[in-house]
Image (spheres, rainbow, N blue to C red):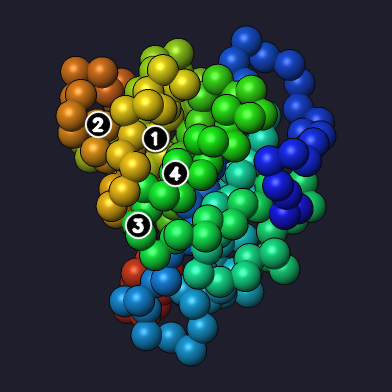
Amino acid sequence: MSVTQTDHVETGRHERRQSIAAVILAAGAGSRFAGEEHKLLAEIDGVPMVRIVIDAARAADVDEVVVVGGSIDLEPIVPDDVTLLHNEPWEEGQATSLRAAVAYAEMRGHSAIVVGLGDSPGVTTEIWNAVAAVDDDLASARYDGELRPPVKLSAAMWASLPVSGDEGARAVMRARPDLVRPVPVEGNPHDIDTLEDLRRWS
């Protein structure tokens, strides 16, 4: 469902102490992918890559799922129970997409967001849940010692996010490593950036 900031979205989720939105960043051009279509639309077992990511987040214990698009039209892919935001200045970098998500989360009254990437189909529902469940203001999934998305950012951290450039949560984690709560998980966090990456999945 594509919405504006004045639209009301029924999430159908149960009430909880924190209101948490899962945010999927999916606005970039995917310029390293040499396929005939945008990489987010490339299919894995017959399902568009970004839809795999969306469905994993939809099954998680969050109050709303938000997809931030930009370079391509994702409306045919995004289910009606998911909020699709269009980030007009997407070419200015990932920070603008995250800022769009934060502005929407503030308007909706969410107290935290858990941010993942639209090109990481190996991030399972269990991983989304593990990161969303921690109480810390800043948390990241940890795969074999490596910190990768999804990343949880409470409202207390949103003002620290960059306003421009191609970094978002990584910049905050680098600036405040003392605040980062690692969440050990099992899974494949790697992005699909090239056709070779896709072949390894298929």
Look at the numbered disc 4 and give the secondary structure of its residue. helix
What residue is pinned by disc 4?
A: 98
Look at the numbered disc 2 and give the secondary structure of its residue. helix
Distance (Cα) linking label 4 and label 2? 14 Å
Q: Nearer the viewer, residue 39 or 60?
A: 39
Q: Amino acid at mark 3?
A: Gly
Mark with earlier residue (4, 1): 4
Mark with earlier residue (3, 2): 3
Is the residue marked by circle 1 packed among few (<14), some (14-19), or many (20+) residues within 10 Å? many
What residue is pinned by disc 3?
A: 93
Q: Amino acid at mark 2?
A: Met
Q: Are marks 1 and 3 in contact (CB under 8 Å)?
A: no
Residue 111 pos. (x, y %):
55, 20
Displayed quadrant of residue 61: top right
Compared across the picture, whether 170 is left or right of 56 comes to: left
Distance (Cα) linking label 1 and label 3? 18 Å
Residue 78 pos. (x, y %):
69, 59
Mark with earlier residue (1, 3): 3
Mark 3 or mark 2, whichever is nearer to me: 3
